[in-house]
Amino acid sequence: MKARYGTNVHTASARQLLLIAALIALPTFAIGQTAAGRFTATGPLDDPNALPGQIIVAGSNPGYLKYNGGGPAFLAGPDDPETFFFRGKLNPDGTRSGDQDEILRFLADARPSAFHVQMFRMRRCNIKDEGDDTHNPFIDHDPSKGLNQAVLDQWDRWLGELEKIGVVVHLEFYNDATDVEMMGWKLDEQGNLHPDEHRFITGIVKRFQHRKNIVWGIEESSNKLPPERVPHFKKIAQVIAETDPHHHPIVQSFVVPNDPDYDFPEGGVLSDPYRGDPHIRVVTWLHLIPHGDDLKMQYHEYSYWAKRDSPYFIVMKNETFFRPYLRTAPLGRRYTWTAAMAGLHCLEAQHKANQWRRFGDRIREDGYLARFMEQTDFYRMKPRADLAAGSTRFVLADPGRSYIAYTYSYSGPMGIKGLPGGRYDLLWVDTVNGRMERRENVDLPPGKPSLVKPDGFSDEVAVYLERR
């Protein structure tokens, strides 16, 4: 007898079949990489100077994100940067008494793979007059007095909790529209940082470099400042890299030039001046334009920025410009998967951890996406929507070797154009509830749509195919 998916079952006992069925029905944590195990090395270290299990950039430019000595890393989760470190009552020693631990407990349950926080939001040097002059880690909130160790200790505890639950932290130095030159932190004639800024950058790196889950961010929407600030940002990246012996990734952040907030300056720059920089290996984009329920247009929006930068950088998006539907089902979920299928890592500012009671399902769905992707070789693939057949809407492909097919409207068998016939191992995911099922040694015909979703799955599914 031959099973529906091509697996010979006549040699298996009834008990074995029940065990196999039970394992298939388990969530991915039972059959793949667990969130808590993300920062654990399971093999030889890729970078002997990085910490075992640490998030790193592997390979030559553009490279890809992975866990040192472990599997690939896919970042998906809430971009909730502005106030996490500063929520709650300000205590006399500079620490905070807020709801951070409650948010962390939710994240431990939702299990996204990424989170974004900021360390400096001073209003006195913000070109948009945003922020709060107490939102910094300095003694008495005075940048000239150096770092407050009580504050850094509290931050380190929170970062440690995020590491325990398997969350990579995009830890960003400066808030959107921050221009530290307004308070005198300018490069000197030799191109060096102001002593107070140098002390800030190096002090933060030295304090948190022992964490495995850190991706250093320089400044949110850095290109809202004039192009003359690019050398300053590059110098910050150089100082971070020279201070950090473990080679944590460094990311620079940009706003799109058609920003609906009209914050992109005349003559502003994109990521081009950073191409070839030896330290900045990751870029991320904000305020990408939403296109309502037209997911084909949304795919083109996301893929434009992915294709533009992918020859030079690992590419993320941290924010789609706000629309209420980005926080609700089904469009909020479909936007995230569309971005992933366009080739982007998927943090999202509209998935707000501080509003988890209202929008927590989006963050859980971020976790489903990350856990699925981290069981694939997505980092070898390119977006190939032209290969979609049957119910498939978008495709990632390493042609002839492995594929990911996704649909938000299953109406019959999914397919991939040009798929070589043969035997494949499959991993299905229901993107609505995160349920996963494996099928091994499946015989697929060439080209013809023949991928039938598992029983009980919703009409929003993805499947990973690896050719044997």
Image (cartoon, grey):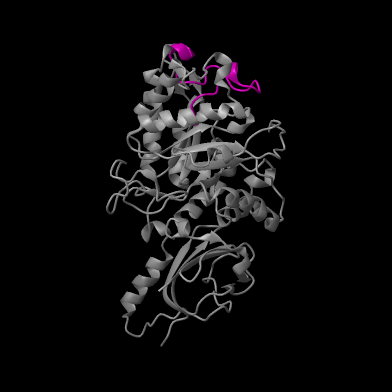
Residue 24, compared with residue 110, is above or below; it is: below
* Among the 4 quarters of the image, the one containing residue 196: top left
Q: Is residue 84 visible?
A: no
Prevalent SS, magenta region: loop
Give the percent coordinates (x, y) of residue 79: 54, 39
Give the percent coordinates (x, y) of residue 44: 27, 52
Quadrant of the image containing the C terminus: bottom left
Tell me if residue 141 is in the magenta stretch: yes
* Among the 4 quarters of the image, the one containing residue 124: top right
Residue 53, compared with residue 221, is above or below; it is: below
- Residue at 29% over, 41% down: 49
| Part of the protein shown in magenta | 118-144
Give the percent coordinates (x, y) of residue 43: 28, 54
Quadrant of the image containing the N terminus: bottom left
Residue closest to the eye, 323 or 194:
194
For this view, does 193 lie left or right of residue 212? right
For this view, does 297 lie left or right of residue 136? right
Which residue occupies the extreme bottom position in the image? 1
Give the percent coordinates (x, y) of residue 408: 62, 62
